[in-house]
Image (cartoon, rainbow, N blue to C red):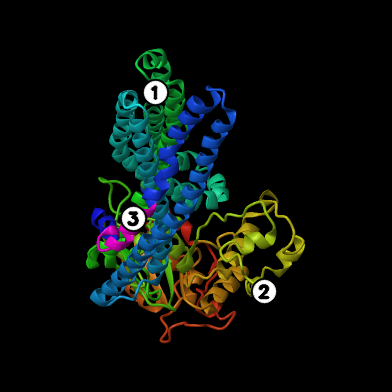
């Protein structure tokens, strides 16, 4: 970064020399101010020659005008240095992005170029203002000190040491301030990300799930870190004020205290007032501007420039991994490879070494006794749980590593406990796709058979009272919401358990016809009969096949189904069976009720 700043002046000799020349003219009013005030007092006002006094002051006014013109010129000369520096930074940024994209064969990261160019603009402004402040201070300080030397050299003894101490103190504090400023900015960003980004957008869910404590713990840490960083920064800001007081105010105090002694040693009243003018009008404000400028803008320059350097100089491979992070799924194939999951380090695995592929567009039913791990499997596929061994991939990316927005866009998991909230019906239905057009909502409502319910509740604009709904009604609304969502992978975890069999069949068929994949954790055997493929889970182990396969191969499956008497094996898989056809596969017999909940079946019934 230093190299970069140094290179901004190196090779620009002529521009720098021109700037120095105009700066010299700029020192004129600073140099003359004290001298002319001293003259106006000693030779004019104190000597009874008021007109002469005004004459000297008039000269001072003229010198200020000349100084103003010189200031205008230095502004232009500063631009000669700042603008090429900006161009150089932009060139670096674009060059860096191109280099990375050619080295990694990844797409050129145009977003990072846009972000960096914006940062370059910040640097440009900050750099110009820092140069201006430093140049202004040098001009004023040099002018004032030369003036003091001319006026009464003895006064330098009172001014120089405190000024040096003040400047030294500030210089010592500057690196610490820079570090703390950076920490404070990073803490701010982290807090904005967790509090504003994650939590603020999910307040309703946090309240609904009673997760206040967890969320407090989650954002408590960044809040503490940010408070700490701010306190540290404030401490250094106080040091800044002390530096200005020592460098700018103490000299004035010393001159006042030593006034009598100065008069006795040959200094005139005019000289004392002239010296005070140098400090009060020149050195003190210039020091204040310098400290404030370097302490604020200068630190921004430092922090932003450091970021640009980091981003443009980072090795290509880390840049590439950063850009590929978080990973993006390609498609919606689900792949489980050797997945083992247990809830505790010593507890038996709920899912044991499971391999499973669910191709995009597939319809899979998962069945098994209560406690077999069906919900656990659903949570693993949805990325809500992470396996201890093996991998769960969605579109080739580890699902637990996707960022929340991507996961939400790709899949939706509807649990047994439906969650509706106090808002309008429409807000509830379009929760996962807030910009859903009315036609899309209407279509979903009709397909899932929710029209009567919606009408009874007063239409999409009506306010919803969650407590006034039955469990089945809540479930139906949640199902419509998921149907509307953009997710192409839908996981129904006994999400239809409160619907009657006909309504359940209608919902499942609608989801099966919807674009994408469907995983149904079956609550009734009819769900398994509707799916092309069935996964039977038991005590961590899994068996897959068609309904007919499983009838042949698994005693547990026969038992689960056999509560109603097993239907004979069939040759054709029941893909897209027409409405009402389910019952053709349904078991027959006196208590042949294909809709009896599976959950009542014991998990050890096959032993
Ligand atoms: N959060 C949890 N902590 C500890 N054990 C759990 C937790 N959730 C489920 N289990 C246990 O894991 C096993 C599988 O549960 P689950 O996946 O809910 O089964 P299913 O959905 O098939 O009824 C059960 O023995 C259950 O007690
Ligand atoms: Mg379950």
Residue 274: give x, y in percent of width and height.
45, 28
- Foreground tag (1 vs 2): 1
Residue that badge 2 annotates: 446
> In the rendered structure, which disc, 1 or 2, sits on the residue that comes first in sequence?
1
Q: Which mark is residue 250?
A: 1
Q: From mark 1 to mark 2, how far is it between C-alphas?
A: 82 Å
Label 1 Cα neighbours within 10 Å, binned few <14 / some 14-19 / many ≥20 = many
Residue 242: give x, y in percent of width and height.
39, 27
Q: Tell me what residue is drawn at x 57 percent, y 72 percent.
A: 505
Q: Within the image, what quadrant is residue 148 found in?
A: top left
> In the rendered structure, which disc, 3 or 2, sits on the residue that comes first in sequence?
3
**Magenta span covers which residues?**
9-22
> In the rendered structure, which disc, 3 or 1, sits on the residue that comes first in sequence?
1
Q: What SS does tag 2 mark?
A: helix
For the residues labelled 1 and 2, say whether their Cβ atoms are less than 8 Å apart. no
Q: What SS does tag 3 mark?
A: helix
Within 8 Å: ligand 2 and the Cβ of disc 2? no
Residue that badge 3 annotates: 305
Q: Quadrant of the C terminus?
A: bottom left
Quadrant field for ligand 2: bottom left
């Amino acid at each position: 970064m230093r190299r970069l700043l140094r290179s901004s002046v190196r090779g620009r000799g002529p521009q720098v020399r021109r700037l120095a020349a105009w700066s010299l003219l700029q020192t004129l009013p600073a140099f003359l101010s004290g001298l002319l005030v001293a003259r106006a007092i000693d030779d004019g006002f104190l000597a009874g020659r008021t007109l002469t006094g005004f004459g000297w002051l008039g000269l001072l006014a003229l010198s200020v005008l000349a100084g103003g013109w010189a200031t205008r010129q230095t502004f232009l000369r500063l631009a000669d240095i700042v603008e090429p520096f900006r161009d150089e930074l932009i060139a670096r940024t674009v060059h860096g992005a191109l280099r990375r994209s050619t080295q990694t064969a990844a797409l050129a990261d145009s977003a990072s170029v846009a972000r960096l160019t914006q940062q370059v603009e910040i640097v440009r402004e900050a750099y110009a203002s820092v140069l201006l402040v430093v140049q202004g201070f040098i001009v004023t300080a040099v002018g004032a000190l030369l003036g003091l030397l001319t006026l009464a050299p003895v006064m330098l003894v009172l001014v120089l040491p405190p000024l040096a101490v003040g400047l030294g103190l500030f210089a010592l504090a500057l690196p610490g301030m820079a570090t703390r400023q950076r920490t404070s900015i990073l803490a701010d960003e982290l807090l904005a990300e967790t509090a504003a980004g994650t939590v603020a957008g999910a307040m309703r869910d946090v309240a609904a799930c009673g997760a206040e404590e967890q969320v407090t713990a989650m954002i408590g840490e960044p809040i503490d870190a940010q408070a700490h960083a701010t306190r540290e920064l404030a401490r250094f800001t106080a040091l800044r004020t002390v530096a200005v007081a020592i460098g700018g105010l103490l000299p004035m105090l010393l001159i006042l205290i030593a006034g009598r002694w100065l008069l006795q040693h040959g200094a005139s009243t005019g000289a004392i007032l002239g010296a005070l003018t140098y400090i009060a009008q020149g050195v003190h404000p210039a020091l204040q501007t310098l400290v404030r400028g370097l302490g604020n803008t200068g630190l921004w320059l430092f922090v932003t420039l450091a970021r640009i350097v980091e981003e443009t100089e980072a090795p290509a491979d880390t840049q590439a991994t950063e850009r590929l992070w978080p990973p993006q799924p390609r498609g919606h194939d689900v792949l489980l490879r050797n997945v083992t999951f247990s809830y505790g380090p010593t507890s038996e695995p709920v899912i044991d070494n499971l391999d499973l592929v669910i191709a995009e567009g597939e319809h899979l039913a998962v069945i098994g006794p209560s406690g077999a791990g069906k919900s656990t499997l659903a949570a693993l596929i949805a990325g809500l749980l992470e396996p201890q061994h093996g991998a769960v991939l969605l579109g080739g990316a580890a699902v637990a590593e996707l960022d929340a927005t991507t996961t939400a866009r790709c899949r939706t998991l509807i649990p047994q406990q439906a969650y509706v909230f106090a808002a309008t019906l429409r807000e509830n239905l379009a929760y996962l796709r807030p910009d859903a057009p009315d036609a899309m909502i209407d279509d979903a409502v009709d397909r899932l058979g929710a029209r009567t319910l919606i009408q009874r509740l007063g239409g999409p604009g009506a306010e919803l009272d969650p407590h006034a709904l039955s469990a089945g009604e809540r479930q139906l609304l949640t199902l419509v919401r998921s149907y509307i969502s953009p997710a192409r992978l839908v996981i129904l975890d006994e999400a239809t358990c409160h619907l009657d069999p006909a309504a359940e069949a209608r919902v499942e068929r609608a989801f099966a016809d919807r674009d994408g994949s469907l995983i149904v954790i079956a609550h009734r055997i009819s769900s398994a009969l509707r799916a092309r493929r069935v996964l039977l889970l038991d005590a961590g182990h899994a068996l897959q096949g068609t309904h007919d396969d499983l009838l042949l191969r698994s005693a547990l499956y026969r038992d689960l189904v056999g509560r109603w008497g097993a239907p004979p094996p069939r040759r054709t898989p029941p893909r897209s069976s027409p409405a009402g056809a389910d019952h053709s596969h349904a078991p027959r017999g006196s208590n042949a009720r294909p809709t009896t909940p599976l959950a009542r079946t014991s998990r050890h019934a096959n032993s």
